[in-house]
Image (cartoon, coloured by chain):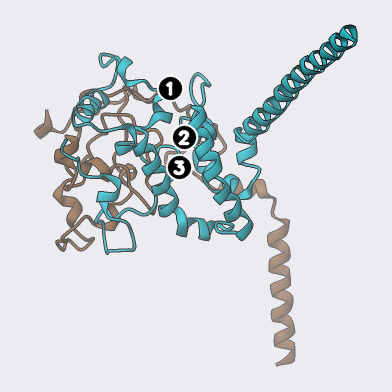
Chain colours: A brown, B cyan
Amino acid sequence: MKKQTRNLVLALVAAVGFGAVVPPSAMAQAVKSIRGADVAEQELQVGNFRPLPDQAPIDRDYVQQPPLIPHKVDGYEVTINFNKCMDCHAWSRYKESGATKVSLTHFKDRDGGELSNISPRRYFCMQCHVPQTDAKPLVANKFQRAEGLR
Amino acid sequence: MTDNNKSLMQRIRGAGWGAIVLLFAAGVIFWGGFNWALEMTNTEKFCISCHEMEENVFKEYRNTIHYQNRTGVRATCPDCHVPKEWGPKMIRKIKASREVYGKIMGTISTPEKFAHERLRLAQNEWSRMKANNSQECRNCHNYEYFDYSVQGRRSNQMHQAGFAEGKTCIDCHKGIAHSLPPVDQNIGVGREAVAPEVLHPPVQKQ
């Protein structure tokens, strides 16, 4: 019994020691990105986009796409205290502000149950809706707008 | 005799002139010193020398366009919070002695205490600006010289509609330099927050 315990401890120490000896470079080699690119490689430079002034909304490209924001949103407060977006887009405000009202899809809980007001899970508008810009595709592609939306 | 009298009169007159010159100089020094001290309290540096201001309102203000922008033209604390005209400035400065009391008593000495007082403090400023027709905004943003052709679609419409209704800047532009107090926007379950009417007071018919 005692011998067994001692062997187990020795084995554990050996395993931990071996793990420490393995060079970190060998561990990095084991990590592969899905597209096979080198993980240590520099990522593509992201364009330094200027926020565009107010303009006509760009059409949607696929069916469930959250519509883009056709105006500047610099400095908009979306905190626990106040949601600047809802100050114009809420159902109680859109008539006065002339903004688009929030979609009824936002009045559902995650199980599809109807709510009487906007679901808290929709609170952070800019997780899905982003300001539009004339960004050129980073990679050449054959993407086409969904058939029903053309 | 007459010679003596003359010289006495001359002496009195000389002393009078001397006193006038001295008083004038003292006045210049006193008024200059008073003004200097007053202007010293009218700087961003002075405002954030208290941690109450630096930890709360200043940090919020640092994210806004009045702190940092394309051209570097700034509006610092006193530009919005202290009137430029002499009379209103003195009134505001005297009222500010209440803030010294608050500082000593630690009314907003922690972020929690500040959050608790935020609505009251914000409403103080909102009502002050409402009362003077947002004079501190208009010191720089003179709406009589707005060029609507260069304004965006939204500001163009809202400004003209707002002025037609007799609104003033602060009626809409609340929370542009600091975070707002909790406002009830009817999202999710209810919580402790002020009614939306506080933020958007109904238009008074004139």
| Residue at mark 2 to residue at mark 1: CA–CA distance | 16 Å
Which corner quadrant holds the C terminus of chain A?
A: top left
Outermost residue, front side:
B1
Residue A48 is situated, as x and y percent measured from the top left of the image, at 45, 24
Quarter of the view holding residue B134: top left
A38 or A124: which is nearer to us? A124
Q: Chain of mark 2?
A: B
Left or right, A94 with reference to B126: left
Quarter of the view holding residue A60: top left
Secondary-structure class at tag 2: loop
Q: Which residue is mark 2?
A: B64
**Residue A63 visible to an observer of this rendering:** no
Badge 2 or badge 1: first in the primary sequence: 2
**How busy is the neighbourhood of tag 1: few (under 14 within 10 Å), some, or many (20 plus)?**
few
Residue B168 is situated, as x and y percent measured from the top left of the image, at 30, 32
A150 or A91: which is nearer to us? A91
Which residue type carries mark 1?
Answer: Cys
**How busy is the neighbourhood of tag 3: few (under 14 within 10 Å), some, or many (20 plus)?**
some
**How busy is the neighbourhood of tag 2: few (under 14 within 10 Å), some, or many (20 plus)?**
some
Q: Which residue is mark 1?
A: B140
Q: Which residue is mark 3?
A: B178
Which residue type carries mark 2?
Answer: Thr
